[in-house]
Image (cartoon, rainbow, N blue to C red):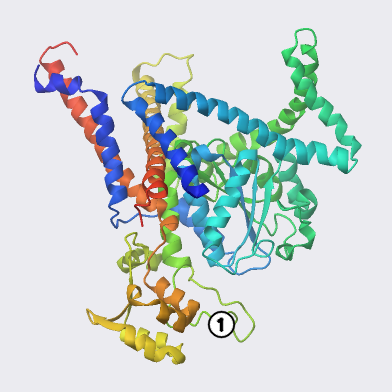
Amino acid sequence: MSFELFSNLVGAFFTLCIFSFLYKDNPFYQAAEQMLVGISLGYGLVFTFERVFIPYVYQPIIIKHQFMLIIPAILGILYLFRFTRNLAWLSRYPIAFNMMMVGMGVPMGMHASILVQMRQAMVPVETVNLFLILLGTVAVLLYFFFSKAHSGAYGKFVNVGKWYMMIGFGASFGLTVMARISLLIGRIQFLVNDVFGLLK
Amino acid sequence: MNLFERMQKLDRRWIYIVVALAIIIPLMIPYDSDNVTTPPTENLYQMIDSFAGREDRAILMSFYHDAATMPELFPMEVAILRHAFERNVKVFALTWFPAGAPLIDYAINSVKEEFPNIQSGVDYCNFGYKPQAFAMVMGMGDNISNAMNTDAEGRKLENLPIMKGINNYSEMNLVIEFSGSSAGMTWIVYARPKFGLNVAVGVTAVMAADLYPYLQSGQLIGMLSGLKGAAEYEKLVDIFAAYRDPAIDYRVTTDAEGQKILPGRPFGREILDDESSLDLSKITTQTKARFTNEQFVAFSGKYPEHLALLNSLREEEDGKAVIDVTKITPEMRDQMGEFLYREINQLTRNTQYKFKVARIGMNAQSVAHIMIILFIVIGNVGYFIQKARGQNV
């Protein structure tokens, strides 16, 4: 038996174990679920050691003698002190260091996510689409303005904002259904094609 | 208990069985259906295609995901790699996720099997897993070789042939990030404003709605959303990049002026709108290469040494010359050589399974959607009829 066939059969077995939950909870499902958690943790640990610790800590410091990297390595180790009661305060230093990155991200994030979006909402209303965008932007913003009661003509207008949001939520929900079905399709394609080779 | 009460109390496991069948049957029995392409997909395709054959242009593919989102994202990656390898576009790849590194190898190796001339370090370069996304994104804006230093195989970037003509984002002018979460944000926030980098994303369908505002503002030049986006891209590659004209001799790779002759053809709206283009993107198995008489004469004229063999394989069908690849024996294949055999095979317009996964999946997706809509409608009908009758629902 080739390694590929063996790995596919193992994958197929655990896929069916997980699917068996659709019928009802059972020992096969529970075993598969717990093995998934355990194997993911073990795999992640070994993988991180192999792909992160060895090439970015061990090799540069021990083999290439880039001793400057000891400082960020120590800073990283300080995270682990979160698990001790007396020295947990040490873990705040790497967190504080990381906040610098957050600070750097604020102005550029403001530019990309707010200013550019605002600029695009302020273009001349030359097409129906642009009018709909303008209407939706104003109506949704006013919907969240709570200093004025949503009544009368004003209430009817902000209700348009609610409809816009409902359409948005509907689109998101539809896309979510599509994504979940895609995952199921992926698994069934694996079972039907990779394991049993029934597709051409 | 009347019908409507039974509908309301239907065991959910029956619904699971129906949904499972609605997906399994279209997968087992593929049928040809059209996937209408959308502007975000077409824009990305055209942008990548504009780099075809250029030494001083490249794309970067960022695999920012792990195996959990592969059913949606992997077909996109395979389709884009196929496009790039068909049209001679330089490709760089990286990941910010340690678990994404094996996926890069898997995607590249899957596609490379069909392109024997594609070489690592010449046509593509895998940077592998890189930590410190922010530093790398900014560093590549100045100099890619200095920021990345080595590729995944530990080779110095500056020594690789692919780096000829490629220095920074001025040349590697398009990044496509594949992700199931915050796709493209690092590039949109840092690289686009500072360096003018073109950014596109391939995302799971769940994420697509969140990213449309960035398309509208022009911060994203294109987007592939979920399996649908992947299916659209597969179709475009089949119709344009993988297209072969029977009259052109693809053994000649440069013209009289030394310019590269690229396989495939550029994107064209009129070709896409033409109904005959559907014949180029079928997902059912195709075994017959069809030619008009003029095309057959031009095609066989390219191989005068195999003219007798090609004529012996020729059949007539609906006024067209046809070569059925299933009738080519191993001896005939040896006689005609691998290049001619592959060309005839390509002219059947048959697409390999790995290059039509998303389109097969979309067939199942369509049937499943119809089932779900039916369930919603039937459930609501039952609910409102019971309510109208004043029964407790």
Q: Is residue B97 visible?
A: no
Q: Which x, y percent locates residue B251? A: 54, 81
Viewed as shown, does residue B113 lie left or right of A54? left
The residue nearer to you, when weighing A45 against A5, is: A5
B99 over B265 or under it: above or below: above
- Image quadrant holding the C terminus of chain B, namely top left
According to the picture, the residue beneath numbered tag 1 turns out to be: B252
Q: Residue at x 32, y 60 (%)?
A: B284
Name the amino acid, label 1: Val
Q: Is residue B232 above or below residue A153?
A: below
Mark 1: few/some/many CA within 10 Å (<14, 14-19, 20+): few
Q: Residue B3 location in percent, x, y?
A: 10, 23
Q: Is B366 on the left-hand or right-hand side of B123? A: left
Can the viewer see residue A81 in this picture? yes
Q: Secondary structure at mark 1?
A: loop
The residue that appears at 76% across and 56% down in the rendered structure is B155
The residue depicted at 41 percent of the width and 50 percent of the height is B358
Quadrant placement of the N terminus of chain B: top left
| Image coords of residue A99 (percent x, y) | 74, 25
Image location (x, y in percent) of residue A98: 75, 27
Q: Looking at the picture, does residue B277 appear above or below residue B338?
A: above
Q: Quadrant of residue A79?
A: top right
